[in-house]
């Protein structure tokens, strides 16, 4: 019997495996795909020489993650920190630019600049304390209650119909709504507001980092460290039950709650298993990768400074599009999340060419190919974009679910991001990574702190598991 088996080599599974191996345990990491990474994969999806991020592309929380700081991520992986974290073009050639420099952002927002400063400055100044609170489960007394109170007060404001009270123009509220839309939920709401404020604060703190070479290099760095500490990786191995892995003192699953229910079966109490099977899924995404003949011809050339671009127009337009998805339909002009990593990283495309990554939110299990909708929305803010396209590759929500079984129905966030499901992720517990089965842990994005590439769920689960060996 070995010490530990980790099932699933996504960022959280890798983080768990690294943590256990560094503690001196004999660990095997098992993955159904032919490469490690899960949501951290980079591949030639369109044409030779064009390196596309298959899943996640920009990593606002990686640079702030306590796990990655302890791991020494930036010493192992070169990151580019853009001067402009994200851009938000509007009709008529206007655009909001979120510089990493908060004061420069404020200067560009005109009469709404002071309101932006009052909203974000305290969060940026206390970003490490805020990360301490948001980086774990919420059922605990915060170590920095004043920081949490300030954040909570802003979440209540921006998650209510009063969310526009502090702004006078349309650029600042559109920018904040674009960041909040990362949560893929109804607007306004407490969870979309919390997401927008957290990501927005990181945009002005450490910045939204891009790893040189694509997201796969993060996974490769974790895998290399795991192997250097004696770990073993088994690829292309499908796991359905405990009989498909080596007997181990502890097993950690970087999987969906639904998989845990099947994997553990009757060993789980009926009530717990029922909760796993009724875990609420969020909306899905549908994605397109483009190989381009050159830069995107943005109407406002300053948008080309930002590797991340939020397309959707005004706050009202984005709200309409996102709420349509929440009701089960798709707007004709959807919110589009775009990254253009090759403006920073020349290794991603042949000289003079570019790659572009874009997705829209869609209802769960949608079969929609989003290529034309995304192309039209980019054309709205970059006329002539269509003429730069050399090739494209799309994934429907169903394709995304098939590619990664954790992304059920195309939900890439590990379940709906709602207040209830942040507290019950997947169940209401002060140790949500621990299951009722002795030695069995869940460590995916379906546990706290939830989605994003931060490794924290795997780190928390591994620390609990290590107590068995103390």
Image (tube, rainbow, N blue to C red):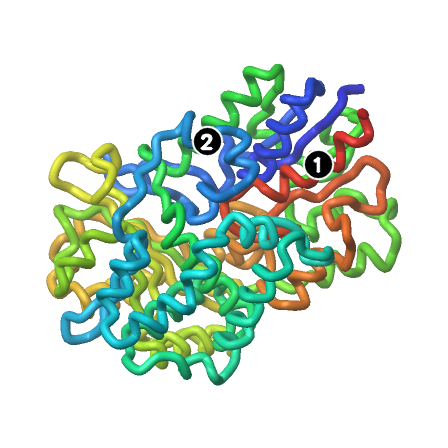
Considering the image in quadrants, where does the N terminus appear?
Answer: top right
Along the horizontal axis of the image, is 344 left or right of 202? left
Q: Earlier in the sequence, mark 1 or mark 2?
A: 2
Along the horizontal axis of the image, is 421 left or right of 151? right
Q: Give the percent coordinates (x, y) of residue 447.
A: 66, 51
Find residue 377 and report its image quarter.
bottom left
Q: Give the percent coordinates (x, y) of residue 200.
A: 41, 59
For marks 1 and 2, give the one nearer the viewer.
2
Q: Is residue 343 above or below residue 174?
A: above
Q: Crowding near pointer 1: few (<14 within 10 Å), some, many (20+)?
A: many
| Viewer-closest of 133 and 39 | 133
Helix, strand or loop at disc 2? helix
Considering the image in quadrants, where does the C terminus appear?
Answer: top right
Q: Residue at x 49, y 35 (%)?
A: 37
Residue 470 in sight in this render: yes
Q: Give the percent coordinates (x, y) of residue 347.
A: 24, 32
Q: Which mark is residue 73?
A: 2
Q: Which mark is residue 252?
A: 1
Q: Residue at x 36, y 81 (%)?
A: 316
């Amino acid at each position: 019997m070995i010490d530990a088996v980790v099932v699933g080599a996504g960022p959280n599974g890798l983080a768990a495996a690294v943590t256990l191996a560094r503690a001196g345990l004999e660990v095997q990491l098992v993955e159904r795909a032919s490469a490690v990474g899960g949501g951290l994969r980079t591949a030639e999806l369109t044409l030779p020489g064009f390196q596309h991020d298959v899943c996640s592309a920009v990593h606002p929380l990686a640079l702030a993650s306590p796990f990655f700081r302890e791991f020494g991520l930036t010493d192992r992986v070169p990151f580019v920190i853009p001067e402009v974290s994200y851009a938000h073009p509007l009709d008529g050639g206007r655009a909001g630019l979120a510089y990493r420099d908060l004061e420069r952002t404020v200067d560009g927002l005109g009469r709404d600049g002071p309101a932006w400063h009052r909203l974000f400055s305290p969060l940026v100044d206390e970003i490490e304390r805020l990360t301490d609170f948001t980086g774990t489960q919420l059922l605990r007394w915060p170590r920095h209650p004043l920081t949490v109170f300030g954040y909570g007060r802003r979440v209540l404001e921006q998650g209510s119909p009063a969310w526009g009270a502090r702004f006078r123009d349309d650029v600042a509220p559109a920018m904040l709504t674009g960041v909040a839309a990362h949560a893929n939920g109804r607007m306004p709401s407490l969870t979309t507001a919390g997401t927008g404020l957290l990501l927005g604060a990181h945009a002005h703190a450490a910045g939204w980092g891009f790893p040189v070479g694509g997201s796969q290099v993060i996974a490769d760095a974790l895998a290399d460290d795991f192997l250097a500490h004696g770990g073993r990786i088994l690829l292309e191995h499908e796991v359905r039950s405990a009989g498909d892995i080596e007997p181990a003192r502890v097993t950690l699953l970087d999987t969906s709650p639904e998989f845990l229910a099947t994997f553990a079966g009757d060993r789980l109490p009926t009530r717990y298993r029922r909760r796993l099977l009724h875990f609420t899924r969020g909306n899905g995404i549908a994605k397109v990768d483009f190989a381009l003949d050159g830069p995107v011809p943005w109407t406002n050339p300053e948008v080309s400074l930002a590797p991340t671009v939020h397309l959707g127009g005004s706050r009202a337009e984005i709200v309409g599009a996102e709420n349509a998805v929440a009701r089960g339909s798709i707007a004709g002009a959807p919110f589009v999340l775009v990254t253009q990593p090759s403006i920073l990283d020349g290794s991603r495309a042949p000289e003079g060419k570019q790659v572009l990554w874009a997705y829209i939110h869609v209802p769960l299990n949608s079969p929609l190919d989003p290529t034309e909708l995304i192309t039209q929305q980019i054309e709205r803010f970059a006329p002539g974009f269509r003429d730069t396209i050399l090739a494209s590759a799309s994934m429907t929500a169903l394709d995304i679910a098939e590619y990664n079984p954790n992304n059920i129905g195309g939900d890439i966030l590990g379940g709906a991001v709602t207040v209830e499901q942040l507290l019950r992720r997947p169940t209401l517990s002060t140790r949500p990574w621990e299951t009722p089965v002795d030695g069995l842990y869940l460590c995916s994005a379906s546990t706290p702190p939830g989605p994003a590439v931060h490794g924290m769920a795997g780190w928390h689960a591994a620390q609990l598991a290590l107590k068995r060996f103390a």
